[in-house]
Image (cartoon, helix red, strand yellow):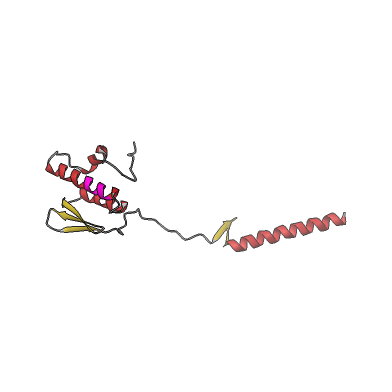
Amino acid sequence: MKKKQTLFLIGPVDPKEMADIVPSQGSDAASLADELLVRANAWLSAGKINFAQYDLFKKRLKETPAVVDAKLDGDVIVCALADGTEHRILPDDANLPEVIVTDSRDTWTLLGITWKKKYWIATFSATAVLIAVLSIVAAKHR
């Protein structure tokens, strides 16, 4: 069974979504992660951060060292980590999946012969014109 993914979360946080982020111990860490995610959701709803930042923040909550506090510095999310360092999530940080760009094929292979597309088109066009001319000439001679 495939898990349903929420693309845009506006409004209260879904408890099912919290199950992936909040530690299962039921400790203070769980309530802290819950509080931080609700705070980030409020920032998203108010338009202070974009969805990419919200999604990256959600992913950061699952990583170690743990996030112990988060605040906004303009439009940058500043996460205070358990080891005393900071992690900044900028508005232009991309979290999109990698896109593989392939070059367009410039050739066609027909009957084991590989030519550029324009040569195949020219060859078949010329052949069609030749057949049309021959059929007209043959019809006039009958």
Q: Residue at left 27%, top 52%?
A: 56
| Nearest to the observer: residue 54 or residue 10 | 10
Magenta-colored segment: predominant secondary structure: helix
Q: Residue at left 47%, top 61%?
A: 103
- Residue 58 can be seen, yes or no: no
- Point out residue 137 in the picture as x, y percentages from the top left corner: 82, 58
- Point out residue 50 in the picture as x, y percentages from the top left corner: 31, 53
As drawn, is 23 to the left or to the right of 118?
left
Q: Quadrant of residue 94?
A: bottom left
Q: Residue at left 17%, top 42%?
A: 23
| Nearest to the observer: residue 34 or residue 120 | 34
| 62 versus 77 height, above or below | above
- Point out residue 141 in the picture as x, y percentages from the top left corner: 87, 57
| Nearest to the observer: residue 67 or residue 111 | 67
Does the stretch in magenta take in 5? no
Residue ranking furthest to the front: 46
> Which span of residues is magenta-colored?
37-43
